Image (cartoon, rainbow, N blue to C red):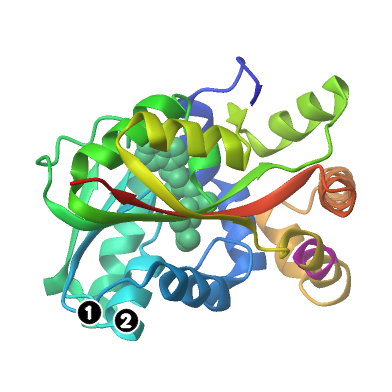
C-alpha cells in the first residue's frame, strides 16, 4: 500500500465540487471511470449482478453507474452514497431527467460510515472511486456490513500494479490525483478476507494504459477549448495537467498502476 498523508476528504470534495471534477467528466463522460459503459458491463457480468436486486453504490458521484445498473441489468433499486453535495445534486437531477428517480435513493455520507442498515443489500458496487477514500479498512468493513449473507461486492479501482514505483513517483501520482492511498489487488484481498468475504476474482482489466492516451488526445485534438474554458483559460495549468496525464500513462505502461477489478462474496 502507498500512502499520502497530506490528502483528506475535504480535498477530494473540493475536486468534485469544482473545475477538476468537471474536467474529468468532460474527458470520461457521466460515468467517471476508465472504460465507461464497457467497464460497467464487464464488471456487472463478471459479478453476475442479479436482476430485481437492491444494491448500494459507494462513491456514486452523479449516479451514472446506478442508472446503468437499472437500465442494463434490471436491478430493482439502488442507493448511492457520496460525500460531495454538488455531485448528489447532479445525481438527483439526472435521475429525475431519465425518469428513474423513484428507484434511486441518495445518501450524503462518508462511505466509511454510511448510516445505512446492516445486511440491507444484495450487492455493493464501486467504480474507480475507492482510491479517494482515506480509511480503506473502514470502507471494506462498511461494504461487508451492508451486504446480506451471500451478497456480492464488485468494484474496479485505480490500484498499484505489479511493478513498484519510486517514492517520488508515488508522491507525484497521489498528489496530482488527490488519492490518500493506493492499494494493490493483494491489499484489497486481505481486507476483504478479514471482513468475512471470499474473493472470487481479482484481476487487472488492462484498460489503464489504453485509455490514458485517449484522454490526452481528446484534450489536444478535440476538446481543447472546452478544457481550457473549465480551467479559466489558464494555459500554464493546461500544460501542467497534460504533463501529469502523460505521467499517469507512463506509470500504466510500466505496470506501476492498473485498473483492478475485484468480485467477492460475503460468507453466510
Ligand atoms: C471518480 S468519482 C466516482 C465515479 C463514479 N463511481 C462513476 O463511475 O461515475 C469519485 C467520487 O467519490 C466521492 N468520494 C470520495 N471519497 C469519498 C468518501 N470518503 N465518502 C463518500 N464519497 C467519497 C467523491 O465525492 C466523488 O463523487
What residue is at 52 percent from the left and 74 percent from the top? 42
Q: Which label sits on residue 73?
A: 2
What residue is at 80 percent from the left and 70 percent from the top? 214
Q: Quadrant of the N terminus?
A: top right
Judge left or right: residue 51 versus residue 219: left
Magenta region: 211-216
Residue 225 on image: x %, y %: 78, 68
Residues at circles 1 and 2 in contact by the CB criterion of under 8 Å: yes
Q: Check if residue 213 falls in the magenta segment.
A: yes
Q: Earlier in the sequence, mark 1 or mark 2?
A: 1
Q: Nearer the viewer, residue 102 or 210?
A: 210
Q: Check if residue 189 falls in the magenta segment.
A: no
Label 1 Cα crowd, 10 Å radius (few <14 / some 14-19 / many 20+): some
Judge left or right: residue 48 versus residue 216: left
Label 2 sits on a secondary structure element that is helix
Q: Mark 1 and mark 2: span between their CA atoms?
A: 6 Å
Q: Which label sits on residue 51?
A: 1
The answer to which quarter of the image holds residue 3 is: top right
Residue 237 on image: x %, y %: 82, 43
**Vertical arrangement, residue 267 with respect to residue 207, above or below:** above
Residue 179 on image: x %, y %: 61, 33
The answer to which quarter of the image holds residue 186 is: top right
Label 2 Cα crowd, 10 Å radius (few <14 / some 14-19 / many 20+): some
Q: Nearer the viewer, residue 11 or 185?
A: 185
Label 1 sits on a secondary structure element that is loop
What residue is at 52 percent from the left and 77 percent from the top? 37
Amino acid at each position: 500500500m502507498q500512502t499520502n498523508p497530506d490528502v483528506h476528504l475535504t480535498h477530494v470534495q473540493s475536486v468534485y465540487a469544482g473545475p477538476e471534477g468537471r474536467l474529468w467528466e468532460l474527458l470520461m463522460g457521466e460515468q467517471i471511470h476508465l472504460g465507461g459503459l464497457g467497464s460497467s458491463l464487464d464488471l456487472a457480468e463478471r459479478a453476475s449482478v442479479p436482476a430485481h436486486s437492491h444494491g448500494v453504490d459507494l462513491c456514486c458521484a452523479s449516479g451514472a453507474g446506478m442508472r446503468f445498473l437499472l437500465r442494463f441489468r434490471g436491478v430493482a433499486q439502488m442507493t448511492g452514497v457520496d460525500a460531495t453535495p454538488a455531485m448528489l445534486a447532479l445525481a438527483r437531477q439526472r435521475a429525475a431527467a431519465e425518469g428513474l428517480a423513484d428507484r434511486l435513493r441518495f445518501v450524503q455520507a462518508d462511505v466509511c460510515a454510511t448510516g445505512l442498515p446492516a445486511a440491507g443489500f444484495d450487492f455493493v458496487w464501486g467504480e474507480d472511486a475507492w482510491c479517494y477514500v482515506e480509511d480503506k479498512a473502514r470502507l471494506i468493513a462498511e461494504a461487508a456490513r451492508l451486504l446480506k449473507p451471500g451478497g456480492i461486492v464488485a468494484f474496479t479501482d485505480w490500484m498499484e500494479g505489479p511493478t513498484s514505483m519510486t517514492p517520488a513517483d508515488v508522491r507525484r501520482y497521489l498528489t496530482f490525483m488527490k488519492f490518500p492511498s493506493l492499494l494493490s489487488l493483494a491489499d484489497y484481498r486481505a481486507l476483504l478476507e478479514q471482513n468475512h468475504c471470499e474473493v472470487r476474482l481479482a484481476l487487472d482489466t488492462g484498460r489503464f494504459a489504453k485509455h490514458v492516451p485517449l484522454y490526452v488526445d481528446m484534450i489536444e485534438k478535440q476538446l481543447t477549448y472546452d478544457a481550457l474554458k473549465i480551467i479559466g483559460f489558464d494555459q500554464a495549468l493546461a500544460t501542467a495537467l497534460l504533463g501529469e496525464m502523460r505521467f499517469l500513462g507512463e506509470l500504466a505502461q510500466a505496470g506501476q498502476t492498473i485498473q483492478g477489478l475485484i468480485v467477492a462474496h460475503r460468507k453466510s
